[in-house]
Amino acid sequence: MSEQIKYVMTEERIPLAWYNIQADLPVPAPPVLHPGTGKPIGPEDLAAIFPMKLIEQEVSTEREIEIPEPVREIYRQWRPTPLYRARQLERALGTPARIYYKYEGYSPPGSHKANTAVAQAYYNKQAGIKRLSTETGAGQWGSSLAMGCQHFGLECKVYMVRVSFDQKPYRKALMQTYGAEVTASPSEETAAGRAVLAQNPNSPGSLGIAISEAVEVAAQDKDTNYALGSVLNHVLLHQSVIGQEAMEQMAMAGDQPDVVIGCTGGGSNFAGLAFPFVGAKLRGEGYEKIRVVAVEPTACPSLTRGQYAYDFGDTARLTPLLKMHTLGSEFIPPAIHTGGLRYHGMAPLVSHLRTLELIEAIGVQQVECFAAGVQFARLEGILPAPEANHAIAAVIREANRCKEEGVSRAILFNLSGHGHFDMSAYTAYLSGQLKDYEYPEQEIAMALAHLPVVAS
């Protein structure tokens, strides 16, 4: 192979359709249940907060769902995103591994989240909705949805997890620049927020709490719908453009991944890269020996230490019941500097693939992650988002394993966002203030003790 660094495709190569892994699953994913009846929910149960087109995508088993042209037109501003060969990192590690990364920080708001934000804003506009409410952790999703709403003339209300609201003021400023109204969560604006503050006025918040507030607002206003940045099937579907492009770009490089890696919080960027490869494997179209690795923080270890069970997607228990790896909807994660990965549950489809042993999962401490991110920035020049540092840490582990074994493998990972608004986290690491944290088993057990009882 040549010494080529990046592999770029023209706008005409943007996928025409999103890929839906539900078409290729060997065992169907468990249904979403109504918390009152315990029976599978119907479209009418979701119609109060989602447009029908997204509800149809949520339950669809069609392999391909056409991307509307107005969405592809906006995608053209940053898609296809480039695929890079990390040659400087390879040399520094002295590894025979071939390391590639798909760079989603190339989008205007700076992460992969824009891929679904634009789609969700489009479908809500088509349904006559005037405003979207949502939650955000680190702010990547909130800023992406704010941008998407601007494209289609929608108002945007964002509940930002309090600890990130305080840690990342420039993410808040970016959302406001895009026209969003941003409130720290938990807040006094909703019953869900007031209930949390009554118990703990200094609550750092969580994505589960912020979801409760955003859902409550949407459910009470016919002109407002709710938008979620991860977890749900239609969100993972929209992210599949990442993996589809990566497959074509790896072919341009004359290579094929042996290992695919992504960080996981709710599961969207991981699924966006990995699902097209897993689908090809399930269809017998190559990739039979590929390993797919999900990487999460040890401080919020839903895939590695959570329970696979039905649970609520939010703290106030306003959502339907999802079968997923969960730490319990009452779980309040510590104030680690990876706001996008501080969620108590994992996407049902990612969780399902884990139970089918089609993917692996590991947990990584934050000091190792930031060490990996700094090393990557100094060698490759791109400052990663703290979330993406988890993937980089796992890549370095895999590359060192190749070195120890004397084997050359192709490693592909998703660099899901840039870290330009996360300098407080890097400052804490560089000054030696960042500490490792592993969530105590006792506290996980306490949160799991309150899982809803679902008849088998």
Image (cartoon, rainbow, N blue to C red):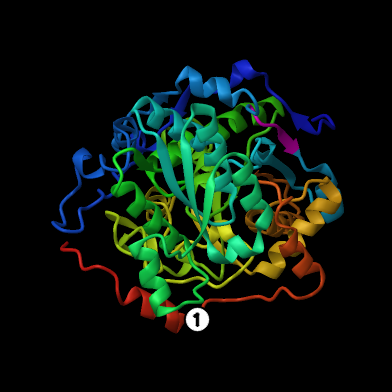
Q: Residue at x 35, y 38 (%)?
A: 22
Q: Residue at x 29, y 49 (%)?
A: 220
| Residue 376 image position (x, y, % from top left) | 79, 53
**Is residue 316 shown to the viewer in this render?**
yes
**Is residue 258 shown to the viewer in this render?**
no
Q: Residue at x 81, y 68 (%)?
A: 430
Residue interval drawn in magenta: 80-84
Q: Within 10 angstroms of label 1, few (less than 14), some, or many (20 or more) residues?
A: few
| Residue 43 image position (x, y, % from top left) | 22, 38
Amino acid type assigned to the residue bearing label 1 in the image: Pro
In this view, which residue lies farthest toward the bottom?
Answer: 442
Front residue of 324/446: it is 446
Rendering quarter of residue 308: bottom left
| Residue 112 image position (x, y, % from top left) | 59, 41
Q: Is residue 139 left or right of residue 10?
A: left
Tell me the element at label 1: loop
| Residue 408 image position (x, y, % from top left) | 73, 46
Quadrant of the snapshot with the N terminus? top right
Q: Is residue 191 left or right of residue 18?
A: left
**Location of residue 266 with respect to 71 vertically, above or below:** below
Front residue of 407/61: it is 61
In this view, which residue lies farthest toward the left?
Answer: 37
- Magenta stretch contains residue 62: no
Main SS of residues in magenta: loop
**Location of residue 449 with respect to 64 vertically, above or below:** below
Q: Is residue 384 left or right of residue 310?
A: right
Residue on which disc 1 sits: 440
Rendering quarter of residue 456: bottom left
Front residue of 437/99: it is 437
Q: Residue at x 71, y 64 (%)?
A: 425
